[in-house]
Image: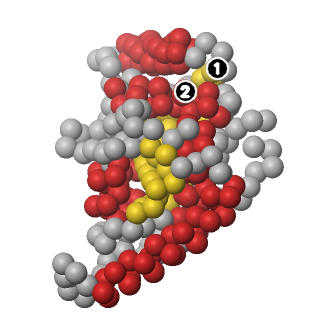
Amino acid sequence: MTEPIMVGVDGSGRSLRALVWAAHEAVLRQRPLNIVHVLLPAHSYATTDEGRAREASNWDQGVMTEATAIAQEAHPTLKVTSSLPSGTPAAVLLAEAARAHTVVLGAKGMGGFGSLLLGSVATQVVGHAVCPVVIVNHVATAYDRIVVGADGSAHSEAALAYAFEQASLRGAELQTVHSWSHPGPHAVVSAVQDALAKEQLQALEEWLAPLREQYPDVEVVEQVPDEPPVIALSRASDRADLLVVGSRGLGGFHGLALGSVSHHLLQFSQCPLAVIRPRPDNPGA
């Protein structure tokens, strides 16, 4: 069975933006779209148990009906399925993610506090899902550019493969960013800095070589900025349709589900962010 593109919706504006992104992704990949709205164990829409149950049912059904209509109106030939499972949202979405090609979520749902850019549900899902997770906060579709961070780690290799595939699907330029830091004081002109920059560029070119061969149609731009990766990638995301990173890099602790760079970019990316981790190939996908 073809793994669907799965999107979680909750009636919030960000989840509707996630829905639009997910529907377009499903069309590009020729996969079905599965819309999931999680029913919480308890509702608080009315003052009585009877009224609470009735109102919650009507509201939840309305969320799903609206989401399905939006996806089908935008893409009439897209196969759309929907489900209303109940339980803790993060646990339910992670269970659904095990059967999905990609999970798409809004950066913050109905339960988020105004001062938080990323909801706890999205944080848990992106930290533990085995499939790619795309977090949609800001949507940009006019740049025709995918940005990907690279550092030579296994998670970075998975991110590069995903980014090349996305660039090929979308006919977009691929901007590859390998950030590094000069170990000593910086100078306006320095032979040491120039030599180190050339080494970093050579490493990036080696990581890209097999994917360039696999995707000859993708135009690749290489960048090796001498600055922290969060700064470089955040800046690049301001001119991109999608930012792609591995869930952990070379500096990550293996006990952590999410590395510090990817965690910070969940907050600061100016475009949808795809967080990728290696997983075994699925012959049935």
**Of callouts 1 and 2, which one flags the residue occurring earlier in the amino acid sequence?**
2
Mark 1 residue type: Leu
Q: Is residue 248 visible?
A: no
Instruction: Tell me where residue 113 sits by quadrant.
Output: top left
For disc 2, the neighbor class at 10 Å (few under 14, some 14 to 19, many from 20) is: many
Q: Is residue 201 visible?
A: yes
Residue holding disc 2: 23
Looking at the image, residue 132 lies above or below residue 3: below
Q: Residue at x 20, y 86 (%)?
A: 185
Residue holding disc 1: 78
- Name the image quarter holding the N terminus: top right
The coloring applied to the image is secondary structure
Instruction: Tell me where residue 50 sits by quadrant.
Output: top left
| SS under mark 2 | helix
Along the line of sight, which residue is nearer the eye, 33 or 169?
Answer: 169
Q: Residue at x 29, y 70 (%)?
A: 227
Q: Residue at x 36, y 74 (%)?
A: 180
Q: CA distance from mark 1 to mark 2?
A: 8 Å
| SS under mark 1 | loop
Q: Position of residue 100 (x, y in %)?
A: 64, 41
Q: Position of residue 26 (x, y in %)?
A: 61, 30
Left or right: 80 in relation to 177: right
Tag 1–tag 2 contact (CB < 8 Å)? yes
Along the line of sight, which residue is nearer the eye, 177 or 124?
Answer: 177
Q: Residue at x 34, y 26 (%)?
A: 13
Left or right: 4 in relation to 235: right
